[in-house]
Image: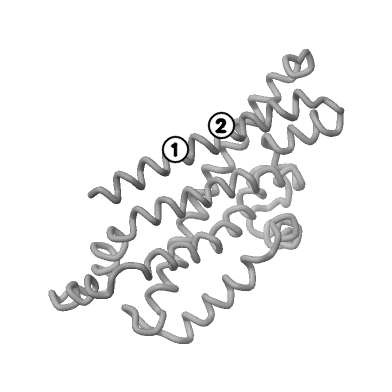
Amino acid sequence: MDKLLELQPEFWEAAFETLYMVSATLLFGGLGGLLLGLGLYSTRAGSLLPNKTIFTILNVVINFFRPIPFIIFIAALQPLTRAVIGTGIGNNAAIFALSLAASFAIGRIVEQNLITVSPGVIEAGRAMGAGPVRILRTIVIPEALGPLILGYTFIVVAIIDMTAMAGFIGGGGLGYFAQLYGYRQFEPVVTWAAVFLIVIFVQLVQFLGNKLARKALRR
């Protein structure tokens, strides 16, 4: 316990780093995933803008990158990370890798939730003269909003897990703190303090996601 009290500044700094990485990843990865998901949904056969070539390219790209374990993905991505961010280590490099990995998973989740929207509702929109973009914006996304919120909540929890591996490239965060000061120095109290705070973060995210989804579903 004395060691944990001694490490309080590093502990709270690691907590802030985790929140920073998760928030930035949700912003960039969430937007990229939404665009990928909308592209997959819109270009699939029988959808709003059917295009077999674009759908096949997006589908193959997501299927190729999504199964790669994040610890391998973050290492393999190093040349691209250096080219885009200017460095291969640190929080921003970790956020770049986290955002790319999250966008592939979110893209698939967005597509899977959008295809559950009733075709009858979309046909009604077409009959009223609405174009593809307007149908997406005013019918498809609002109709799938509740499940989409739950899907994003699931991904945020996964991102919190993934930040534990950001320490591999010097990204910091609670996972790295637990490994450096807890596991490697045989201080179980330090390790469990980091684990406890990560669990609190996950519970808060899940609670907020469930509440927002219920509100969206009751509209």
Residue that protrudes farthest toward the left in the picture: 128
Q: Residue at x 23, y 62 (%)?
A: 138
Q: How far apart are the two marked residues, 2 and 1, measured between alpha carbons? A: 11 Å
Badge 1: residue crowd in 10 Å (few <14, some 14–19, many ≥20) = few
Sequence-wise first label, 2 or 1: 2
Tell me the element at label 1. Answer: helix
Q: Residue at x 79, y 29 (%)?
A: 182
Residue 207 is tagged as: 1
Residue at image mark 2: 200
How many marks do you count on the picture? 2
Mark 2 residue type: Ile
- The x, y position of residue 209, in whole percent, is 42, 43
Q: Nearer the viewer, residue 91 or 109?
A: 109
- The x, y position of residue 135, in whole percent, is 25, 69
- Residue 198: quarter of image: top right
- The x, y position of residue 115, in whole percent, is 38, 70
Tell me the element at label 2. Answer: helix
Badge 2: residue crowd in 10 Å (few <14, some 14–19, many ≥20) = few
Q: The N terminus appears in which quarter of the rendering?
A: top right
Above/below status of 117 relative to 148: below
Dot 2 and dot 1 residues touching (CB under 8 Å): no
Classify residue 48 as left or right of residue 66.
left
Q: Residue at x 80, y 33 (%)?
A: 180
- Residue 11: quarter of image: top right
Q: Residue at x 64, y 29 (%)?
A: 196
Classify residue 94 as left or right of residue 24.
right
Mark 1 residue type: Phe
Residue that protrudes farthest toward the bottom in the picture: 52
- The x, y position of residue 6, in whole percent, is 75, 15
Above/below status of 192 relative to 51: above
